[in-house]
């Protein structure tokens, strides 16, 4: 156990004569509570710790932290601790008590601190944590394992992440080139940020897969930017093992940390424990104990001094330490030479000192005796932030020294200046104002110290000083790194009000453009937007006339950035400026595209369509605003004639399209994606125009999308051979032009099975998903991933792997706020979970996944016939068929026929093919149960339709038709023929690779033999095979259902009951 604060242990501390009280002496090991440490190799043992004297009174808080670490070590899970309190209350010191325990137990302890002054390092606190993790992991025995897991999980993305977190290079040994940099591309900003967030999660999950526990401490969360908060939240939600997160922040009514802390209270945030620790001021008794330890006196002797300290500091530990140093520097607390003990005069202490509630004033009073040159240099350091480079401080300090007439050191040469500045830093370190950080870096000992020196600069002078710092750094521009360039621009921006002259403002505007582009490469997209906005604000009044290119770049990048992070107001302002001042239509095209996406995201589809029609008219492409059937068939006839004039090879050999025509294709592609759900007739016209533009003017990166959409139209018209020809052409064009395969993923969902086997198509769809994410085509990529998971479910891939893939896509859709995609995906995921037995009623889609879906639909007011509701009904119908709930299945089927739900997608998506199979089975069962002839007629109608599709080339239907033929043979009452027919169907399913349908065939065969021929032995053989296949598939619910449904049949067998019963 941690030693109680009431321990009778004696403490002794000695100081040399005349020694000043500093933070280092007050926290020296000699005056610590020494507690016998134990062997940390056994995690079952209670962890002992060392408590510093200024942490007296924090035993309960320390015990909470240590217990949380114990749980992480024992359960190998993760926990989150939030530590809050006022400035100087001792939050950091409290958490740091865990460091020694972690190191002794073989774990990693890393920390990152958010800075009040924006740092040039994007996400500096996060990067500091990741770099430390890399450095410490590289020294551990698990280095090779972590390296291999990192390379496997991040793949090529590791190079991009390593350019941001340099420690990854040392850990993995990879090389980073310029080609790995991220560039600002259209509509990629939000995607790049989420990709980086995903990389952070993958990195941390790879590291925590090792055996050692990790403690990650984030300090001063109240200074974190929104992007860092979002990344931190994603880490807290997604890292589930071997990690203790500790987040410290100051109490604030409207700080950025409030949203994260509030989120942590929600059940959906995390399933792990979340501990809240509020650190309060010390009570009088604890404060007296702390002072008695510091001054090496018994508590009864220090009681009077402690009373004064408590009244003047309210028990704030940092205030108390600073107050004691103030007393010592004021000669009110002295070390007696004779008694070698600290002495003080209570009356003088009471009357000659004052401590307000502002800690900055306490420290400022203590600085009266500090040397002027030390104070001036530390003021400069305070302007650079909590962490600062020695090189940057020296550059600025030398510039100030040369300009200062009163310094008396202006005659010193360059090397002497360095010696002088090093001596200043040594004095500051000795006084514990600053301390060494990473190589070439210093950091403040406490945030309050930085604030104190900063507050010593008058407000009007502070802006000028920031400007002076920026200008001083700018003189070394040829040798500046990206980090130093951003530091320079930050300083110049903080002194913007002092910038005089249009030339200087124009230069600063250009620097902000460069800083914004650097921020993009660092994934700091919100920072990039701020730089662009600052650059726009610095432009002269007639900038669009005199500085056109600069104005266009700043406004375009700002509009693109604002749209990417969801700031619609700023997007509108920047787009309007471009449309009003752009000289050429080519300069306005990107603004129009951004405007279309903005309007569609706000639900203004009509305005979006109107805007596109006007722009395309200027580009020479006329579109009907509200097309009718005549427009569609007219456009289709013209397009068909143009296609018939060229062979596939001739189309592939077409030249590249001119830039002016590419702009038209850009806008057509953009509007087709955005208004697809609003007006599909217009989308058909758009796709036909894209095909004709490609045939007439050459091919471009958007051509494959147009040809693929034309192929889908041909499928709907039952022209399957032409559909496959054009669909295959779109794939070849995509390969030739090296465009994203996510654009043409629909080929594998709606066209491919008309010529090729369906099993294995999920690999192509996953390839399209990864390719699309890399290219920034998030929506297309996520739908490709969704269809991959759906294809895995339909084709009988192992359910555990299917669920894993669907959950991955589900999480990515949440990150990208793909609400429509989620409404499609969640029924598929819930259906797979039902089959695995993770739902009370496997026939009904009512698990946790669907409850989330219902809440979102009700809150957004979604149309029940839109989005994923149709798919949900389809999957419910299929589950009802699989589990033999024929009444419920018939209810869904009647609903489909009444609403004509599949009218538009008939014979197109692979889902319809599986729907037809289960529909036919349902009609057969309804005929068996009711004897109604209409059901047999419907069964034969569906079967006939499937045969026609097979004749047209549909490969997917071939094994399915065998099952339907076997079902129909049952009516002929010949068990030999029935068994042979079902054996043929089972063989066909096995050869096609449909594990789920192979199991289903065996189950249907058992049903037929049992109900029609009463042959229990043959039926049992089929049921046993069905059970084995369902188990291999991973459908635990089906295995259990088969066990319960046919248990009596198996128990009544007399020939070999033991083997069958044991197998079940």
Image (cartoon, grey):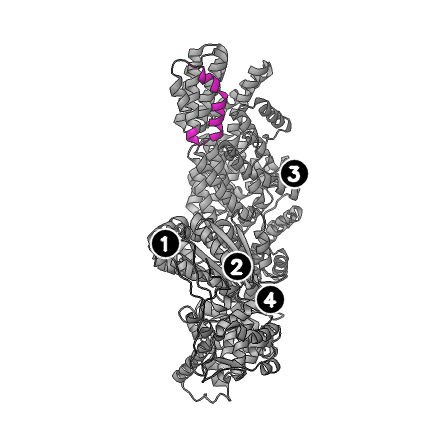
Task: For marks 4 and 1, give the one nearer the viewer.
Answer: 1
State how far apart marks 1 and 3 are (Cα): 59 Å
In front: 656, or 80? 80
Earlier in the chain: of badge 1 and badge 3, it is: 1
- Asked whether residue 157 is drawn in magenta, I would say no
In front: 655, or 394? 394
User: From where the camera sits, is residue 807 visible?
Assistant: yes
Can you tell which quarter of the image residue 867 is in?
top right
Location of residue 689 with respect to 495 vertically, above or below:
above
State how far apart marks 4 and 1 are (Cα): 69 Å
Q: Main secondary structure of the magenta part?
A: helix
Q: Residues within 10 Å of mark 4 (few under 14, many from 20)?
A: some
Can you tell which quarter of the image residue 1033 is in?
top left
* Tag shown at residue 863: 3
> What x and y, as percent, mark residue 829?
52, 37
Task: For marks 2 and 4, give the one nearer the viewer.
Answer: 2
Q: Residues within 10 Å of mark 1 (few under 14, many from 20)?
A: few
């Amino acid at each position: 156990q941690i030693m109680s604060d009431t321990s009778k242990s004696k403490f002794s501390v000695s100081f040399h004569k005349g020694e000043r009280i500093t933070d280092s002496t007050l926290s020296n090991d000699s005056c610590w509570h020494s507690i016998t440490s134990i062997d940390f190799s056994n995690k079952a043992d209670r962890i002992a710790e060392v408590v510093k004297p200024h942490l007296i009174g924090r035993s309960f808080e320390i015990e909470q932290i240590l217990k949380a670490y114990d749980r992480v070590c024992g359960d190998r899970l993760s926990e989150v601790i939030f530590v809050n309190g006022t400035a100087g209350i001792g939050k950091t010191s409290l958490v740091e008590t865990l460091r020694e325990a972690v190191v002794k137990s073989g774990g990693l302890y890393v920390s990152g601190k958010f800075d009040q002054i924006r740092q040039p390092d994007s996400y500096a606190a996060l990067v500091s944590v990741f770099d430390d993790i890399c450095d410490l992991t590289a020294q551990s025995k698990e280095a090779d394992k972590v390296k291999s897991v990192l390379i496997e999980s991040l793949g090529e993305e590791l190079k991009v992440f390593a350019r941001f977190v340099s420690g990854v290079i040392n850990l993995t040994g990879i090389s980073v080139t310029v080609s790995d940099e991220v560039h600002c591309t259209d509509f990629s900003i939000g995607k790049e940020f989420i990709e980086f967030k995903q990389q952070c999660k993958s990195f941390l999950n790879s590291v925590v897969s090792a055996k050692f526990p990790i403690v990650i401490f984030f300090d001063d969360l109240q200074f974190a930017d929104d992007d860092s908060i979002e990344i931190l939240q994603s880490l807290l939600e997604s890292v589930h093992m071997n990690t203790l997160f500790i987040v410290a922040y100051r109490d604030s009514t409207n700080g950025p940390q409030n949203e994260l802390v509030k989120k942590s209270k929600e059940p959906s945030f995390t399933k792990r424990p979340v501990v809240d620790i509020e650190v309060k001021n010390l009570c009088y008794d604890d404060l007296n104990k702390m002072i008695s330890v510091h001054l090496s006196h018994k508590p009864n002797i220090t009681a009077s001094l402690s009373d004064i300290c408590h009244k003047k500091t309210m028990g704030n530990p940092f205030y108390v330490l600073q107050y004691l140093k103030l007393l010592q520097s004021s000669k009110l607390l002295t070390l007696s030479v004779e008694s070698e003990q600290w002495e003080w005069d209570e009356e003088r202490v009471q009357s000659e000192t004052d401590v307000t509630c502002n800690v900055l004033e306490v420290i400022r009073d203590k600085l009266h005796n500090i040397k002027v040159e030390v104070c001036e240099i530390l003021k400069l350091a305070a302007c650079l932030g909590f962490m600062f480079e020695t090189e940057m401080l020296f550059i600025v300090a030398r510039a100030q020294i040369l300009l200062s007439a009163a310094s008396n050191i202006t005659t010193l040469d360059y090397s002497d200046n360095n010696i002088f500045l090093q001596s200043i830093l040594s004095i500051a370190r000795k006084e514990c104002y600053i301390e060494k950080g990473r190589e070439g870096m210093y950091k403040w000992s406490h945030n309050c110290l930085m604030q104190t020196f900063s507050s010593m600069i008058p407000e009007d002078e502070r802006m000028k000083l920031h400007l002076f710092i920026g200008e001083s750094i700018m003189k070394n521009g040829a040798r500046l790194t990206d980090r130093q360039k951003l530091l320079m621009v930050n300083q110049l921006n903080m002194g913007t009000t002092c910038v005089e002259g249009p030339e200087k403002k124009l230069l600063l505007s250009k620097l902000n453009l460069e800083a914004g582009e650097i921020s993009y490469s660092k994934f700091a997209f919100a920072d990039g937007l701020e730089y662009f906005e600052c650059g726009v604000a610095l432009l002269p009044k007639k900038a669009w006339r005199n500085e056109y290119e600069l104005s266009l770049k700043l406004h375009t990048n700002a509009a693109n950035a604002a749209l990417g992070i969801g700031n619609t107001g700023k997007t509108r302002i920047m787009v309007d400026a471009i449309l009003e001042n752009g000289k050429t239509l080519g300069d306005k095209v990107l603004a129009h595209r951004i405007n279309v996406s903005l309007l569609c995201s706000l639900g203004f589809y009509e305005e979006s369509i109107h805007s596109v029609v006007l722009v395309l008219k200027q580009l020479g492409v006329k579109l009907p605003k509200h097309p009718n059937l005549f427009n569609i068939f007219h456009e289709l006839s013209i397009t068909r004639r143009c296609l018939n004039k060229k062979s596939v090879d001739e189309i592939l050999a077409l030249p590249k399209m001119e830039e002016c025509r590419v702009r038209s294709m850009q806008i057509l592609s953009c509007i087709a994606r955005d208004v697809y759900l609003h007006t599909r007739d217009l989308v058909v016209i758009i796709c036909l125009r894209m095909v004709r533009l490609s045939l007439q003017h050459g091919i471009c990166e958007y051509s494959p999308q147009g040809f693929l959409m034309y192929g889908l139209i041909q499928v709907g018209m039952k022209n399957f051979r032409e559909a496959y020809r054009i669909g295959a052409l779109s794939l070849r064009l995509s390969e030739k032009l090296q465009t994203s395969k996510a654009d043409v993923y629909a080929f594998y969902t709606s066209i491919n099975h008309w010529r090729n086997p369906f099993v294995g198509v999920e690999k192509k769809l996953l390839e399209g998903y990864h390719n699309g994410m890399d290219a920034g085509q998030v929506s297309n990529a996520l739908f490709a991933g969704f269809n991959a998971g759906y294809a895995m479910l339909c084709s009988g891939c192992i359910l555990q792997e299917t669920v894993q893939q669907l959950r991955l896509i589900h999480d990515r859709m949440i990150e990208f706020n793909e609400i429509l995609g989620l409404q499609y995906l969640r029924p598929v995921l819930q259906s797979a979970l039902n089959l695995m037995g993770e739902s009370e009623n496997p026939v009904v889609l009512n698990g946790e996944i669907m409850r989330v879906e219902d809440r979102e639909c009700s809150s957004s007011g979604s149309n029940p016939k839109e989005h994923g509701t149709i798919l949900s009904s389809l999957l419910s119908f299929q589950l009802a068929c699989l589990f033999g709930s024929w009444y419920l299945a018939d209810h869904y089927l009647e609903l489909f026929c009444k609403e004509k739900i599949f009218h538009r997608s008939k014979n197109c998506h692979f889902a319809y093919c599986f729907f037809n199979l289960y529909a036919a089975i349902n009609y057969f069962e309804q005929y068996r149960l009711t004897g109604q002839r209409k059901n047999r007629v419907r069964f034969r109608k569906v079967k006939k339709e499937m045969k026609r599709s097979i004749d047209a080339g549909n490969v997917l239907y071939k094994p399915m038709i065998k099952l339907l033929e076997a079902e129909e043979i049952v009516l002929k009452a010949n068990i030999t023929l029935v068994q042979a027919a079902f054996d043929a169907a089972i063989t066909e399913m096995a050869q096609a690779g449909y594990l789920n349908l192979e199991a289903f065939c065996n189950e249907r065969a058992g049903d037929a033999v049992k109900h029609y021929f009463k042959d229990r032995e043959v039926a049992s053989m089929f049921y046993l095979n069905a059970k084995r296949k369902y188990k291999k598939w991973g459908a635990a619910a089906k295995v259990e259902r088969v066990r319960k449904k046919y248990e009596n049949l198996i128990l009544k067998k007399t020939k070999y009951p033991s083997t069958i019963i044991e197998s079940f």
